[in-house]
Image (cartoon, helix red, strand yellow):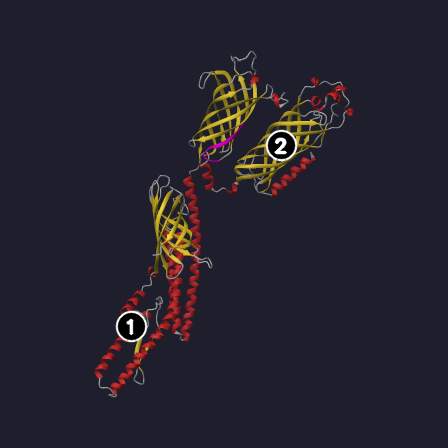
Amino acid sequence: MKKITFLLTIAVLLSTKYKTNAQVNGISYTFAPTAEFQKLSDKQGISDGYFVGGKVGFGFGQFVELKANYMQSLNLKRDFSKLENLGFDAANLKDQSVDITRWGGELKINLSNKALVPYLSVGTGVQTTSTDSSNSFKNIYFTGGGGIQFSAGDRYTIALGVNNNYINTSPVANLLNTSERRNNGLAAADFPPSRLTNLSYNASLILYLGGKRTSEFTDVDKAYLETFSNGFNGISLPLEISTGQINFAKDLGLENTKFIGVSSGFNFGQYVGIRGFYWRANEDKYFSPVQRLAIYGIEGKFKLASNNGLSPYLNVGGGKIDALTGFQAPTASTFKDSPFVSGGIGLDLPFSKYFKLSAFAKAMLTSNNLLENSQKPEDLSTSWAYGLTANLVIGKKSRNLDKTLNSSYDERIEEALNVEKKKTEVLKSEYELKIANLEEEMKAAIDKGDKDEFIEKSTEKKAVEKAVEKLDDVLVKENKANNYPQNGQVASWGLTPTEFRSSISNIKMTMESEMQSLKNTIENNQMKTSMEIQELNFKIESINIALRSIESNQKDDVFEIKSQLNRDLLDIKNKLNLIDQKTSSTTTIIKTEDGTLQAVAQAPTVINQSPAANTAYLTDDQLNAVAERNQNTGFFSKLNYSGASAFGGFNLGGNPTANLGMRWHYQYLKSSFYVVPETFFGFGNPASFGLFLNGVKEFNIKKANSFTPYIGLGGGFLKIGEKGEDVIKLTSNIMIGANLFKVAGGKFYVDISGRGLFKHNQFVAGYRLPF
């Protein structure tokens, strides 16, 4: 007893330290190495000793476990020292080793789901006993008890328990051989079997495999679990009608019979149920009048799957075969009422969450006095029952899945938006600090008299200020577009986190692009303007020579010289206008102190044009057109068409379809960023189609030849059949893929597009056309 008290104390202390709960929800598999100490009855004729073994089985949620067990004794001895009152001298008996093995089944009920769990258990099975000098013999045993288990870590517990084991046996008949009984004047018939009680103390390490911890279940998990299992939440009430056939054991003296009956009880969640049943034997065929023979009892039902399809299950129970008043046995002998224990399997076929059919088969083990006189397994008679059951279920409906999904979706959207808004506020603060720094740099440039640096910093400041204004606009737009769930109101999302993030990214990219464009323009234009002015000064020098020749009357063809001068001056004027357009500067011709002409470029004001391409081969009119076009700094003016592509594939999610479509690829400047409009048509019932605008970023990998992975983000309109609706909706698009290899001047690629946060998934292979 002191040992037990010590072990219980240790268990309580450990359960206080470890707050984790190792029990799991769903169907789990349990494995439990076990050791026990048995204090055998004084009338057993065997010494006390230790057993080792294990238990394996199923866990049905957190509260019910069904196990098969096997135990083996260690170093037991025959001990008749407490049986000398039977009339023989135990000292004359030789010491002999006794070997006991037990195998059977056990039902365990956990009474809590906390760290410290009390439990109850019941079971039965067959015990095999053998000695050195006698043949082995078998007995049926029954066991019942309880204990506590505590969580020692994730998915394993330690259990300590106490059990009473009941067995019908005779030590004189079973443990003494014929010569030993004869020498002591004993007869086996004088010592019939009697029920003995053995007390056992056991300890197990229980491992839970599979299932899912309760703490890992989200509200969406629970809603899906309830919707796609039995469709009910908590306790439900089954109403069942059964029919089938019973094949009775021959020694019962009963003929095989058809039966019809009813059953009802409770389902505790989706895995475990208990039923009381009452059957009556038919006189002849199915649904014929019933006889005065009843079969009734109680059984537990344990489902081995959690889905809305075919679900196998186990049943374990017991009851009575009852000959009612007026029953006529088919043989001359009179049939006596017989108790039974039963076990079997079945299969549920659900047609809805309210109605299902079940097929079952079970063995019924019978004995006239099952608990008192059953000594050997062969003392039991085995009858078989099999049939069909129509099952109507009444219970509390599971939570609305769509409502739960919407609620969870709204929570995630709100959380993601808050994250994006915080990031935007941080980015805005950084930009405002940058503006303050640029203002300081502008003041420093004024002090130094550096007009170029002042203009550069001023232009940067305007670009950053423009970005801050756009950030404010996005925050205002989000506040107006989104209605957050408050006080039970339904949420609406006019601007999703993805769209919000995309807007902020575009603002950052635009500002960075303007900064880079400014830098390139200043560097390139300074060089090009210097060269062009040198060219003009060369022409002006020729004009100066001509003017001097006119003044000195060195040439007679004055008219021809003047005509050439006018043409040269007109050409210079056009070139100056072109320079002014490209640089936003003022280039003029001045007269120097010595009376000669010279072209001079004044400092530019605001420069934001992209650098011009090499245009040496263009005419003046074409140069003017190029300069006019370069004044357009919009986003779409920087997109260059780089080909189209065709693709084919399929869609999973919603209504399955076979998809064919086209994409058009526009490269942004010379970067690895592309704007990709896309359209597709899906062949299915119903058909689907979509129109999307995507931004795609390619990632060039060195030494990867033509392999180029890419990701994309976009949105558009999608029509796809889902749950019967046929509507067009605005949704997001996430693209992940890669260009694999080149074929005939084009590129072969594969990718997946997740529409609506991967609610609808398009898998395609495509070809990038070389035109």
Residue 314 locus on image (x, y percent): 52, 30
Magenta segment includes 310: yes
| Residue 53 vertical placement versus 710 (above, below) | above
**Secondary structure under the numbered disc 1 in the rendered image:** helix
Neighbour tally class for label 2: few under 14, some 14-19, many 20 plus, Cα within 10 Å? many
Image side of residue 308 versus residue 331, left or right: left
The image quadrant where one finds the N terminus is top right
Residue 424, magenta (yes or no): no
Where is residue 390 shown, x and y percent of the image? 44, 26
Q: Position of residue 346 (x, y in %)?
A: 50, 29
Between residue 480 and residue 458, name the one nearer to us.
458
Q: Which residue is mark 1?
A: 577
- Residue 88 is marked as none
Q: Tell me the kind of residue under disc 2.
A: Tyr
User: Toward which corner of the image does residue 468 lie, by quadrant?
Assistant: bottom left
Q: Which residue is mark 2?
A: 70
Q: CA distance from mark 2 to mark 1?
A: 102 Å
Q: Which residues are magenta?
A: 306-316
